[in-house]
């Protein structure tokens, strides 16, 4: 049976169960969040002028940060009613897991967080999703988390995989007018946007959380993005993206590929490749205010890529910023786009019919990153964040208006900003380079894989 056929059958089986869950019948029912914590209440734009969103792939919080001091990440989970001890798995283990929309719902299991066996592919043991990567294989991430801020309540904005996750990181909204459906998973031929072949239809879901494969061509005109608000305020931005081959030519793996106004307009010059250019562009005097950075497949942390270079790639980006003149005015957010099928113990709050989705790791790095009380470094934030929390911080920093109303599907207005993970009253903290297995030069000389960092299998 094909993966797509299996997904359809699983979704049908879950349809009745999920239709009655949480607030599945509305676009957004959560009121705007309360004022941020006092420590982060100072206007961030007085101190921050450069924001980096570094995006990695397909890991749950538990999979990378099990046992991290102060974080909600126990060493066991539940498969149905069976208590299951998480087992170590190599970062470069060749196996991967299902991580499309219906599998996320099955893993979540109406908040019981006990259905992750469903993510195991045919021929894999059902316990495989109940795994964690040992600390010594992701040392740069653990070092960053122990020195700066680890957010243990960052949830993907919706269930499902990379296509919608990356859209949420630029526009906070995948709802399709008039609000009956929303984008769900990758278009069938894996091409993200306006460069898709004629006749491509995107995957969508309805308010009953049922998936269909008859959505619109993935070249959207109805949604506002951060490009619109940044451009209007004359705030510079750039999206660093890898080149990928889709069988009929090369394209760029960027969420902005699905935004018609950007793809066919002058803003497309802000989408640059290779993504490794960020490592040298940082020293340019005209470096932009806001950047998104997506990795090459080999450096993405994606399960099954057979590589252990992801932590070093992120360390190279962070080190490049930290040792540059930009450090004193920078904020770096490292976030993973979806859970990848791996176990996580924290039930995501349900904001609407799309999610929130399953928890992912998030590390926040800045001279003004909060410090744990009584310590010189490190802070675990238990605030509930979603991807709109990052967009909201951008808006607060550069005095931008929200993208739109929660009633129309925009999540930046409703989200709690990550601003409370900063303390602008503290003395700015110095940067110490992060040790890593592979140096910056390795990535500058690396041959591009030309493969999409995630094919949402």
Image (tube, helix red, strand yellow):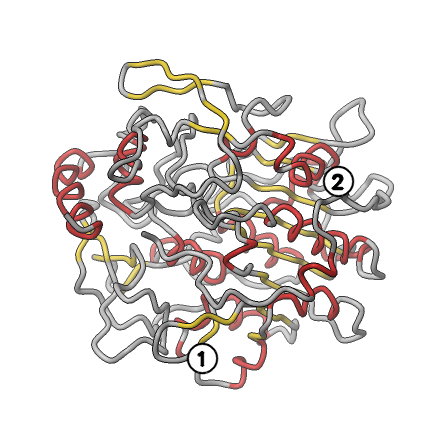
Q: Quadrant of residue 159?
A: top left
Instruction: Report the side of 73 relative to 22 (left or right).
Output: right
Q: Quadrant of residue 83?
A: top left
Q: Nearer the viewer, residue 296 or 253?
A: 296
Q: Quadrant of residue 199?
A: bottom left
- The Cα atoms of the two marked residues, 1 and 2, are separated by 37 Å
Q: Position of residue 321 (x, y in %)?
A: 76, 57
Q: Position of residue 165 (x, y in %)?
A: 42, 54
Q: Position of residue 287 (x, y in %)?
A: 73, 71
Residue at point 49%, 51% (across, down):
388
* Vertical arrangement, residue 112 with respect to residue 200, above or below: above
Q: Earlier in the sequence, mark 1 or mark 2?
A: 1
Q: Please tell me whether mark 2 sits on a helix, a strand or a loop.
A: loop
Badge count: 2
Q: Which mark is residue 128?
A: none
In front of the other: label 1 or label 2? Answer: 1
Neighbour tally class for label 1: few under 14, some 14-19, many 20 plus, Cα within 10 Å: many
Neighbour tally class for label 2: few under 14, some 14-19, many 20 plus, Cα within 10 Å: many
Residue at point 73%, 41% (across, down):
369
Q: Position of residue 397 (x, y in %)?
A: 67, 57
Q: Please tell me whether mark 1 sits on a helix, a strand or a loop.
A: helix
Q: Which mark is residue 263?
A: 1
Residue at point 27%, 30% (across, down):
109
Residue occupied by mark 2? 423
């Amino acid at each position: 049976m094909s993966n797509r056929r299996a997904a359809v059958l699983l979704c049908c089986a879950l349809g009745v169960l999920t239709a009655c869950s949480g607030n599945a019948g509305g676009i957004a029912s959560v009121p705007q969040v309360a004022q941020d914590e006092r420590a982060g209440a100072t206007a961030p734009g007085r101190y921050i002028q450069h924001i980096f969103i570094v995006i990695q792939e397909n890991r749950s919080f538990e999979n990378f940060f099990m046992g991290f001091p102060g974080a909600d990440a126990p060493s066991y989970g539940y498969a149905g009613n069976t208590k299951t001890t998480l087992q170590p798995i190599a970062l470069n283990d060749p196996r991967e897991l299902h991580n499309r929309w219906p599998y996320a719902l099955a893993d979540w299991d109406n908040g019981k967080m006990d259905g992750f066996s469903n993510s195991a592919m045919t021929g894999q043991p059902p316990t495989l999703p109940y795994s964690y990567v040992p600390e010594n294989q992701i040392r740069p991430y653990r070092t960053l988390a122990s020195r700066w801020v680890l957010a243990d309540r960052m949830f993907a904005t919706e269930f499902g995989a990379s296509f919608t996750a990356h859209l949420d990181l630029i526009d906070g909204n995948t709802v399709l007018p008039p609000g009956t459906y929303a984008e769900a998973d990758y278009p069938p031929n894996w091409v993200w946007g306006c460069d898709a072949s004629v006749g491509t239809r995107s995957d969508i879901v309805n308010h009953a959380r049922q998936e269909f494969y008859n959505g619109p061509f993935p070249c959207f005109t109805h949604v506002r993005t951060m490009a619109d608000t940044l451009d209007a305020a004359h705030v510079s931005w750039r999206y660093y993206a890898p080149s990928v081959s889709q069988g009929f030519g090369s394209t760029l793996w960027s969420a902005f590929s699905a935004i018609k106004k950007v793809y066919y307009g002058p803003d497309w010059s802000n989408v640059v490749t290779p993504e490794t250019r960020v490592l040298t562009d940082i020293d340019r005097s005209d470096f932009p205010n806001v950047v998104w950075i997506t990795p090459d497949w080999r450096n993405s942390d994606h399960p099954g890529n057979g590589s252990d270079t992801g932590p070093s790639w992120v360390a190279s980006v962070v080190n490049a910023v930290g040792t540059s003149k930009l450090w004193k005015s920078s904020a770096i957010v490292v976030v993973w786009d979806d859970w990848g099928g791996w176990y996580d113990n924290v039930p995501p709050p349900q904001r609407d019919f799309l999610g929130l989705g399953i928890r992912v790791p998030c590390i926040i790095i800045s001279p003004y990153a909060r410090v744990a009380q009584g310590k010189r470094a490190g802070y675990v934030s238990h605030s509930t964040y979603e991807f709109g929390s990052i967009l909201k911080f951008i808006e607060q920093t550069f005095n931008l208006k929200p993208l739109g109303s929660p009633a129309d599907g925009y999540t930046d207005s409703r989200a709690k900003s990550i601003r409370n993970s900063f303390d602008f009253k503290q003395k700015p903290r110095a940067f110490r380079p992060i040790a890593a297995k592979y140096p910056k030069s390795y990535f500058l000389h690396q041959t591009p894989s030309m493969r999409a960092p995630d094919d949402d299998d």
